[in-house]
Image (spheres, rainbow, N blue to C red):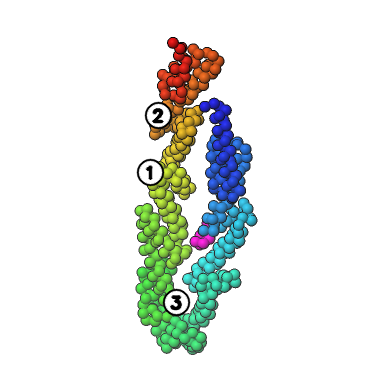
Amino acid sequence: MSDERQTSEREGRLARLYGRATTALAAREWEDALYLLEEIAMVDPTYRDTPVLSRHAWQEVRLIRAYTRGVAALKTGDLEGALGHLNWVVNERPEFRDSMQKLREAQQQARLSEFYRRGLNHYTQGRWSEAIEAFGMVIAVEPGYRHALDMLEDSREQLKLGNMYRSAMAMIDSDDWDEAAEVLRSIQSQSPGYRDAGGQLREVERMRALYKLYERGKDARDVGEWTRAIDFFDQVVAAQEDFLDAQQLLREAIREKQLVYLNQDAEAAFEAGRWNEAIEHYQNIIAMRSDYPRAQARLVDARRWRDVQTAYDEGMRQFRANHWFDAIVQFEAILTLDPGNEEVRDLLDQADKKKRLADLYEHAGRCLRDQNWTEAVEWLERVEMLDPNYRDTGHHLERARRQLQLARLYKRAGQASEAGDRAQAAALYAQIMDIDPTYRDVATRVAGDQPRP
């Protein structure tokens, strides 16, 4: 095949790819356009305005991917992920779809979530004023947000009743029983049955004994002796269920003891690499108490290692199936989470090499099918440089070289024949016959060049 024909076919192929790429760009089919432009770049990186179009298509693909991930994260409540992706989109192109609106929505949800979390935190700690302030901020922005209104009203009620109740308890501590009774009657009128204020009123002396048990329970709670705290609060609650906040403190002590056991189970699962089990335990811990020491950080780590394990399993599955690109994606994902993973880094190198070999071999195969022997030799030699034993590269390389040699000899013989040098032509045709007697019309040409009897 002549160089001019090879060049013409190459230019024709590039032009066809370029046409399909520009059509895809016009249709805003960015992924398809990027793939076609990358094919062009593999043959001729400077072809027309391919680099410019590739950058444009890649930017559009990145925007679409980031926007899609941001919206998906927003829907699933992953506000950190949503903010990260949507912020990037807005910074790159503020007018992209409704990214600005989605970003504002994510920002508002993040603010509301933070206020609501603070409110719950204050609420569970009995810090009613702070809870009221936090829930009030939530209601001011979104009145129907979760249970914020109920929590706000209950916090106000708890604050009011708590103040009155503490006042009564202070009076009891100072043996001011008349004033204490008046306050307790006021509590009964506003909230009948509140902490058994009536029982407090009838049994002031018994209250003193209960109060001592209550104080001992609080002391045990303050030093983290949950079993003793549960015992003391349980005695108080058994005698008088609504004594001060004994029930709440009993629930908290039981919860804290449960948290200790949950945390032990979580740590054991974490250390054993049972990531899903560890994640479940840490999620339960955080659901019970969001500020439990190390739980948030350990949950993040467990999720990260679970993602590493999941990606590793999927990467190995794709690797064994010879799906090199999919394996590469998984291994690269692992290295973003675990940069020091040498095993995965080695697997990534292997997958990358296998992919390059497969791509080169595929290019060579197309050239062989098209009988483009020059390029076939080039692609096959590149395969051979990476792996001399790759599939049947040696066989195909030998064939392509032979066909290239035959084509050159045939061309020279034709030129000699046209120049009237029959001896040279015959010698060249004889060389061809030695290599491949069936090559093209060589046998006919050799017969035609024999002297007539």
CA distance for labels 2 and 3: 86 Å
Residue 299 percent across, percent down from the top left? 44, 58
Query: At x 49% / y 16%, what residue is drawn?
Result: 425
Residue 432 percent across, percent down from the top left? 44, 20
The residue under label 1 is 320
Q: Label 2 crowding class (10 Å Cα cut-off): few <14, some 14-19, many 20+?
A: few
Q: In the rendered structure, does residue 39 fall within the stretch colored magenta?
A: no
The residue under label 3 is 245
Closest to the observer: 159 or 182? 159
Image quadrant occupied by the C terminus: top left
Q: Label 1 crowding class (10 Å Cα cut-off): few <14, some 14-19, many 20+?
A: few
Residue 299 visible, this orientation: yes
Quarter of the image for residue 346 reads top left
The residue under label 2 is 395
The amino acid at mark 1 is Arg
Do tag 2 and tag 1 residues touch (Cβ < 8 Å)? no
Q: Secondary structure at mark 1?
A: helix
Magenta-highlighted residues = 73-81
- Residue 189: image tag: none
CA distance for labels 3 and 1: 61 Å
2 or 3: tag closer to the N-terminus: 3
Query: At x 62% / y 42%, what residue is drawn?
Result: 52
CA distance for labels 2 and 1: 26 Å
2 or 1: tag closer to the N-terminus: 1
Depth check, mark 2 against mark 1: the one in front is 2
Depth check, mark 2 against mark 3: the one in front is 2
Q: Secondary structure at mark 2?
A: helix
Q: Where is 58 relative to 438, above or below? A: below
Depth check, mark 3 against mark 1: the one in front is 1
